[in-house]
Image: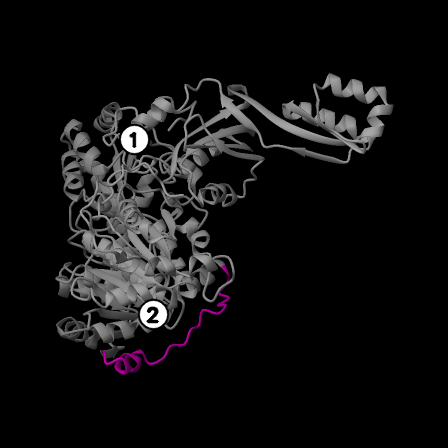
Amino acid sequence: MEEYNITAYTENQVGLLNRIAIIFSRRKINIESLNVSPSEIEGIHRFNIVIVETEEVVEKLAKQIEKQVEVLKVYFNTNADVIWQEMALYKVPTDVIAEKVLVERLLRENGARAVVIRKDYTVFETTGHREETDSLLRALQPYGLIEFVRSARIAIIKASDGFHHKLQEFEQREPSEEVAENEFLNDREKVFTM
Amino acid sequence: MFQTQLAPAPAAPATTPITGAVAVLQALVAEGVDTIFGYPGGAIIPIYDALYDFKEQLNHVLVRHEQGGIHAGQGYARASGRVGVVLATSGPGATNLVTGLADALIDSTPLVCITGQVFAHLLGTDAFQETDIINITTPVTKWNFQVTNAEEIPEALAKAFYIARSGRPGPVLIDITKNAQLQAFDAPAYRPCQHIRSYRPAPVVRPEFIAQAAALINRAQRPFILWGQGVVLGEAEQEFRAFVEKSGIPAAWTILGAGALPTGHPLNVGMLGMHGNYGPNVLTNECDVLIAIGMRFDDRVTGRLDKYAKQAKVIHLDIDPTEIDKNVKATVPVWGDCKETLPLLTALVERQAHPAWLARFQSHMAEEVDAVIREELFPTSEELTMGEVIQQLNEITRGEAIIVSDVGQHQMVACRYAQLNHPRSNITSGGLGTMGFALPAAIGAKLGAPARPVVAIIGDGGFQMTIQELGTIMQTGVDVKIVILNNQFLGMVRQWQELFHQRRYSFVDIQSPDFVAVAAGYRIAGQRVDARPDLRPALERMLAHPGSFLLEVMVTKENNIFPMVPQGCSVAEIRLK
């Protein structure tokens, strides 16, 4: 089992989130992280889904997602194949930070940035991998951490050329060789790019 | 937000406004629909009001329950190859469709279901007969969409029909709020949908895989073909037959594929799966190349997967990429419409015969005849068997009838023994195993193929699940022959309890009403038979009868269906007794 990043390019349609989510819940697979955002193309949405599973299962899930009528394309990648980030916010009492030099050093070491500073509390933000946001969380616990929240993961695929070219083909009526989208048959043991 | 990728319609000539309800019916007419199954209710009254003026173009069949309506739609679609259309109201009307949707999805049946919905401004308020049917049906539809504005109707219905029938077919549900049905708008001329950018129903075929498949087949010593409903859905029966005959390979079928090659064809070696024929199951684990065509390696076909055809190279032809490698890893995947891929493959395979290999199927069949079939079809026991009813039916209809079966022991008997000369002749609930399917599906099948005799084979349990559709038969006068094989048990569960649960017959002893009297109450002629000499004349009377007829046949109470691959066993461990 390994962490996989599933990237789906989709239409913007009410109900599609449910249609995708139930592909996981039907198999009792927990979604570790889910982010839906615009993509590089106006009107096309991009899902970033993180799950921990075997490659075989992830490949089947990816195919099932791509089978949905409003999904254009699905990729899946290991963490090594993507650039990824998560953002975290930490709310801590301002007086503690003002008093403890250690805290200030901690924040500096973790590249945290103050978003809001008020008399009663201060909100810091960091962006990074899970271990990084986690380590600051642990470090701040002893200093009266009031609130913590972490965003879903967003990920860019290292090897991707983006979606513009593919979309043009998808919009043509007669599919070209590539839009046939069966290049997954080329190297079936390694990468799924149905 | 509705998808916007379709180019805007060209400026239409000035039109008079129509209501959303009329737009729905115009769309149905434009899609060539002639028959719809439905049941009215509050939230769909505007569409029914408009239907009043469409009686000439659309034959609306008033069913007795929405589940009956959707199974009738399925029967219509399976018999005719066209899209079945079903109307239901919101709330309970819509939720009564769920079983049929699940059945149609797993059996790849093209349906367009249209449900009424409460006014858009009431959505989410727990209004009378409001239910979130879009979310309820998401797991059991190929696509669904809620219309809240009449202007969305033409495009939504165009997409619905396109999606339902293209690629791997499936059910689509369109939920239309009452305000949208009532709303008047300037409808553009109806344009059928031919392309959705995010949806590719069929891929471009990759010739190199065809070549690899052909090379494997040409070198094979013991090749074996498994075919499923994909051959029928792709209307590729001719192409399939040409492939089988040129390659000379024995071919076995799933119950949904039955009939694509006639029962009597010399290379048709029988039925796959748990209650399939002996040879096809045993020899699955001895073939060297397994060629699966339009089938999905269902667990009832494969038995224990880790002992399934491990020795064989597998060639899998399927239009749905999620099926390739899903249960059985393909050595050569041939992703595509088999109507397209089979001729390419046929062109590359050498004309061959495999007499020694075929003889092994025949010798296993002889074993099965001795152990099971002879006694089932020509019993020496006093009591009637299910098999002899099918055998007698075969002798009278000569394989020309459409056989619609329900779910259970009688279904396995019907599928195993019915003679089928034509495709689209074996209509049954395969993947979902829905008891209550057959009676309404038979109504739909007759309307979808009016020139052919339709015989429903139903158990005493399943018949009582949708018995109310006798009312539909009465009112429409549709000619359906109903054969109830009554063993006074929920027989398949009883069989499992006998074999695997120490004969603890837990709630399988089901009582039935006097079915002939019930039919008479619906003004349907009927007869009950419990002695062998009466069987043949009764079947002949039934088939000669003008209009519907119910024949109840009392059969042996505790007969078991064999052969059987017990659950958790490999296909090679199939038992003859």
Which residue is farthest front? Answer: B14
- Where on the picture, by quarter, is residue B459? bottom left
Q: Can you give x and y, in whole percent of width and height, for residue B78 in the image?
A: 24, 54
Residue A133 to residue A25: above or below: above
- Where on the picture, by quarter, is residue B282? top left
Residues in magenta, as a range: B501-524
Magenta highlight on residue B508:
yes
Magenta highlight on residue B482:
no
Residue drawn at the location 40% of the way across and 61% of the way down: B94
Quarter of the image for the N terminus of chain B: give it.
top left
| B373 lies left or right of B32 | right
Quarter of the image for the C terminus of chain B: give it.
bottom left
Q: Secondary structure at mark 2?
A: helix
Residue drawn at the location 51% of the way across and 62% of the way down: B126
Frontmost residue, A77 versus B47: B47
Residue B461 to residue A99: above or below: below
Q: Can residue B436 be seen? A: no
Amino acid type of the residue that numbered disc 1 sits on in the rendered structure: Glu
Which residue is farthest right? Answer: A99
Check disc 1 and report the residue beneath it. A171
Marked residue chain, label 1: A
Q: Can you give x and y, in whole percent of width and height, for residue A31 in the image?
A: 56, 37
Q: Secondary structure at mark 1?
A: helix
Q: Which mark is residue B463?
A: 2
Amino acid type of the residue that numbered disc 2 sits on in the rendered structure: Phe
Q: CA distance from mark 2 to mark 1?
A: 49 Å
Task: Please state which of the two labelled residues, at mark 2 or mark 1, is closer to the viewer.
Answer: 1
**Residue at mark 2 shares a chain with residue at mark 1:** no
Q: Can residue B146 be seen? A: yes
Marked residue chain, label 2: B
